[in-house]
Image (cartoon, rainbow, N blue to C red):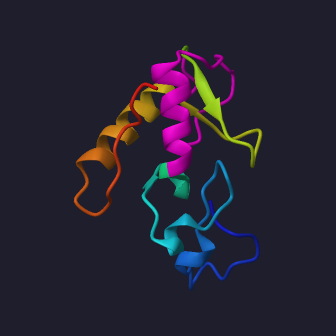
């Protein structure tokens, strides 16, 4: 997501925020994944979503589109604390965590079971 009031012709890293926590993780150099229409999930939020949906099998199916893929899926989703309308589906959590884990640009690993 982009910070409100930005110059769309001159988007800076500090203008790119995680859709799920609102932090400018891009400019901080933290791991993150970009979805459709400029959506972003940071590594910390992705770890929380992964722990909740994949490891703990928590999460509820919602009728809102996933912020990352823009689809409504018949599977659990996760929401952060920043924007109640921002959800990420189980499929995107799995795909994003695999992509971050394989990335040579970021040091990130899927959370392990406690």
Magenta part of the chain: 44-73
Front in this rendered view, residue 87 or 25? 25
Residue that appears at 60% across and 17% down: 58
Q: Residue at x 55, y 37 (%)?
A: 48
In the image, is residue 87 above or below residue 26?
above
Q: Position of residue 96 (x, y in %)?
A: 39, 41
Q: Nearer the viewer, residue 93 or 10?
A: 93
**Does residue 57 lie above or below 72 as drawn?**
above
Q: Nearer the viewer, residue 3 or 113?
A: 113
Give coordinates of residue 74: x percent, y percent: 55, 14
Task: Examine the rendering and report whether any part of residue 69 can be seen.
Answer: no
Count of marks placed on residues? 0
In this orientation, does residue 114 appear? Answer: yes
> What residue is rendered at 46% in x and 64% in y?
30
Whether residue 96 is situated above or below residue 30 in the rendered picture: above
Residue 1 percent coordinates (x, y) = 62, 59
Magenta residues: mostly which secondary structure? loop
């Amino acid at each position: 997501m982009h910070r409100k009031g930005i110059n769309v012709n001159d988007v800076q890293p500090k203008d790119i925020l995680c859709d799920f926590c609102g932090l400018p993780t891009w400019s901080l150099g933290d791991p993150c994944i970009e979805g459709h229409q400029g959506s972003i999930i940071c590594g910390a939020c992705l770890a929380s979503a992964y722990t909740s949906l994949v490891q703990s099998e928590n999460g509820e199916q919602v009728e809102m589109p996933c912020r990352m893929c823009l689809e409504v899926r018949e599977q659990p989703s996760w929401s952060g604390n920043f924007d109640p309308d921002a959800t990420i589906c189980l499929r995107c959590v799995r795909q994003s965590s695999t992509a971050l884990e394989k990335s040579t640009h970021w040091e990130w690993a899927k959370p392990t079971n406690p």
